[in-house]
Each structure stands twice: as structure tokens, then as C-alpha cells.
Image (cartoon, rainbow, N blue to C red):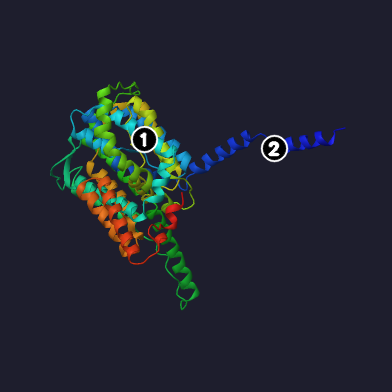
Amino acid sequence: MLHSSELNSHSISMAQPSPTPDSSSSTVQKVKRNLVMRSTWAELNGAMGDLGTYIPIVLSLTLAKQLNLGTTLIFTGFYNIVTGAIYGVPMPVQPMKSIAAVALADPTFSVPEIMASGILTGATLLVLGVTGLMQLAYKLIPLCVVRGIQLAQGLSFALTAVKYVRKVQDLPKSKSLENRHWLGFDGLILATLCVCFIVTINGADEDHGCHRQDQGQEELRRETQVRSKMRKVRRVFFSLPSAFLVFVLGVVLAFVRRPRVMHEFRFGPSSIEVVKMSKHAWRQGFIKGTIPQLPLSILNSVIAVCKLSSDLFPGKDFSVTSLSVTVGLMNLVGGWFGAMPCCHGAGGLAGQYKFGGRSGGCVALLGAAKLVLGFVLGSSLAHFFNQFPVGILGVLLLFAGIELAMASRDMNTKEDSFVMLICTAVSLVGSSAALGFLCGMIVFVLLKLRDWTNGKPLNAIWRHEDTNEQV
């Protein structure tokens, strides 16, 4: 017979089972929930919303700087699957745009410098996230300044998209050439039809109609049957994966434009090698790449993404700390092997949401496709993407930019709108999110000090919206 002390210890041990199985099972269940797709076609369509940014940048660096396309596809595909499983939203994985711009503009900025700048940027973001400094920045930066950065980035995407549609592009040199012809497999008419198709599918509201009470029963029954058939037709039409169909059209036209591209495919993954980086590469990567990239990554890849995610997915709960850590880890892992420096991006998230992405399964599908292409075709896929109609990429980028810019429509006061537009204007004209952020913060502080001198209490000088604290 057990003594009382033995019985108590036995009951305590029975009441407190090992936490490891429960925690592991709950983690597995969370991953499953995060990857469950609301609609396979909608999620597949949403996965196309990020390609208008991804393909031009990666293709340009592949052709101009001999970036290892196969390695980039493999690593970014892996990132897509992991981030989709972690966050449960279509969290994008995009190339770091400032580093890409420097690489395309500077002939001396080659692959070692690109990788060094990405690793240093990732390490900095990881430190900011782990130490809690990113969380502090998120709380201190006012919403109107964040909206200004989002509006500037969205308009920048839209303007670039219009340039892709109107002008012939030399992607390796990042230059616009002569006006695009109206006809042809990459002409203005094709791009215009694609825009009209997406607007019709994604911008249409279903009209449910109404019943008239003064009709006879037989006439009402016939009209109900007709309306039911019409509703089914409209439901099928408006549920078409517009972005996916437009992308498939681009794939078909790429083969039509140059059928010989099939013979340029080389099956098998590209060799993954460690990139050798000299002291000069580290120094140049930090000065020319990391310093201009950091403000953009902090503002658009972490803070703006977190705010936009809370707007689009109120039930999801993740912080700027987790976003900063994942961006840091992505670059600390892939940068050593030649994968393009990557980050999250508010524009990619807005684009995927616009076209139907609602879960982590959206980007997991995209990641799986990248992995397959990376392992099967490797860098030889660059020959195919070089034939892809740039005008169609511009169409996809246009809607991503507009969706991101529309997030700024919640500025309800004239003061907030003023700060937002100052931040946007400086960011666009100066081509620098950091400069726009600095000007926006200065104007915001001046307006708050002006309110304080007019008699407002001190606690009203730096008041934030409640949503700015939900992290």
C-alpha cells in the first residue's frame, strides 16, 4: 500500500506528463492548419501575384552577373515552403531590390559582393530581431509613415509595370528601349487584353438579383431557374484563376517565340558551390549593398509587411521580431551558396492576396514548383525566361502595386494624410525609402510639437493607433 507522500508524488507525476509529445503534435497540427488551402485554384492563382517582381530581377542578375539561377530557385523554393508553414499566410520571398539595383548598375559589383551584402544585411536583421530593437522600432514608427512607404512602393511597382508594358526592356542592363509594338507575341494589344481579362475576373461583383413579388408562381419558378443557371455561369466565370491563366499564356508564347529554346534545356540541378568572398568583397558589399538595402528591408520587408498582414489577416498573430529573424536566417543560410539575397515584401504579399492567396499553402505551391524547376532544369531555365513576354510580367506587377498602394486608404485625418504623402513624394522622387522615411518622421514630429505648443497634453504627442501595437 502506498504512503500518502508516495501517493501524492505519484499523482503529480501522472498529472504532469512529458510535454514533448504534446508540443510536437501541436506544432504538426499548426503546420497542417497553416498549409490548408481554402481553394486550390484560388491559392494557385495567388501564387502568381509575386512573379512580376521575382522573375525580372532574378533573370536580369542571371544574364548580367551569372547568378546561379538553379541554386536561387532551390533555396527560395525552400524558403517559400518554410515561411508558408510558419506563418499560414502567403508570405512572399522576394529578391532584395536595392542590392539587385546596385549589382545591375555597377560592373564591379559581382556575385561575391552580392552574396556578402546579403549575408551582412541578414545578420543585421537577425540581431535587430533577437535583441527586440525591431519591435521597438515598430512601436515608435507612426502608422502614417508606414503607409507612406507602402504607397510609395506600390506606386513604384505600378510605374515600373507600365514601363514594362509600354517599352521594350533590356533586363540585363535594366534599361528601357524603344516603344513596344501594338502587335506581336509581346505587344501592347496582348498586354491590354490581359489587363482587361484580370479586371473583369477579379474586379467583378456577383449580382444576386432579387425576386419580384407580383409575378405568378409559374413565371417566378421559370425565372428562378434561369437566374440559377446564370448564377452558376457567373460563378464559374468569376472563379477562373486569371493570373494563372495569364502566366500560362506567357509560357505558351515563350515557346512560340523561340521553339528552339526546348533544345537549350539541360536536365539536372546546377552545381551548388560555396562562394568565395574576399575582404574586398565584404567591404564593397557592405558599403554599396548593405547600407542602402537595410532601410528598405526594415521598413518594407519587416514593418510594412507586419502591418499589411494584420490588415489583411486579422486572425493571424506574428510579430516584426519573427519576420526579422526569418529574413536574417534566409540570407545567412543561402548567401554562402550563391542564392540571391531575399526578403519578404509588402508588394508581393499584396499581389498574392489580390489574386486569391489566403493561406501558407499558396506560397508552398510556388515553393514546390521552384524546387522542381531548380532540381530538374537548373540554370538552363534562364534561356526560357529570356523569351517570356515582359509585358505580361508588367501586367502581374501592375496589380500587385495597385493592391499595395490601396492599403493606404485608411488615413482618416488630414494630418496623417499629409505626413503619408510627404513620405511618398520624397521616396518616389528621391528613389530612396530611407530618405522618405526620414522626411516623414521629421514632419510627423514637427506636427506633434505644434500640437503640444497649442495646449495638447504630453501623452497626446506620440499617440498611435491600437492596430500599431498588435504584434
Q: Residue furthest right?
A: 1
Task: Please name the amino acid that badge 1 sits on.
Answer: Thr
Mark 1 neighbour density, 10 Å: few (under 14) some (14–19) many (20 or more): some
Question: Where does the N terminus fall, quadrant-wise?
Answer: top right
Q: CA separation, marks 2 and 1?
A: 41 Å
Horizontally, is 183 left or right of 327 in the view?
A: left
Q: Which mark is residue 16?
A: 2
- Closer-to-camera residue (97/381): 97
Horizontally, is 414 left or right of 457 in the view?
A: left
Name the secondary structure under disc 1. Answer: helix
Residue 247, image quadrant: top left
Circles 2 and 1: CB distance less than 8 Å? no
Figure check: 202 above or below 255: below
Figure check: 71 above or below 454: above
Mark 2 neighbour density, 10 Å: few (under 14) some (14–19) many (20 or more): few
- Closer-to-camera residue (194/400): 400
Task: Please name the amino acid that badge 2 sits on.
Answer: Gln
Horizontally, is 107 left or right of 221 in the view?
A: left
What x and y, as percent, mark residue 7? Answer: 81, 36
What x and y, as percent, mark residue 410? Answer: 36, 60
- Closer-to-camera residue (187/137): 137
Q: Earlier in the sequence, mark 2 or mark 1?
A: 2
Figure check: 77 above or below 193: above
Residue 376, image quadrant: top left
**Count of marks, rendered view:** 2
Residue that carries the numbered disc 1 in the rendered image: 124
Name the secondary structure under disc 2. Answer: loop
Whether residue 212 is visible: yes
- Please name the residue shown 25% across and 33% down the image: 287
- Please name the residue shown 38% across and 65% down the image: 456
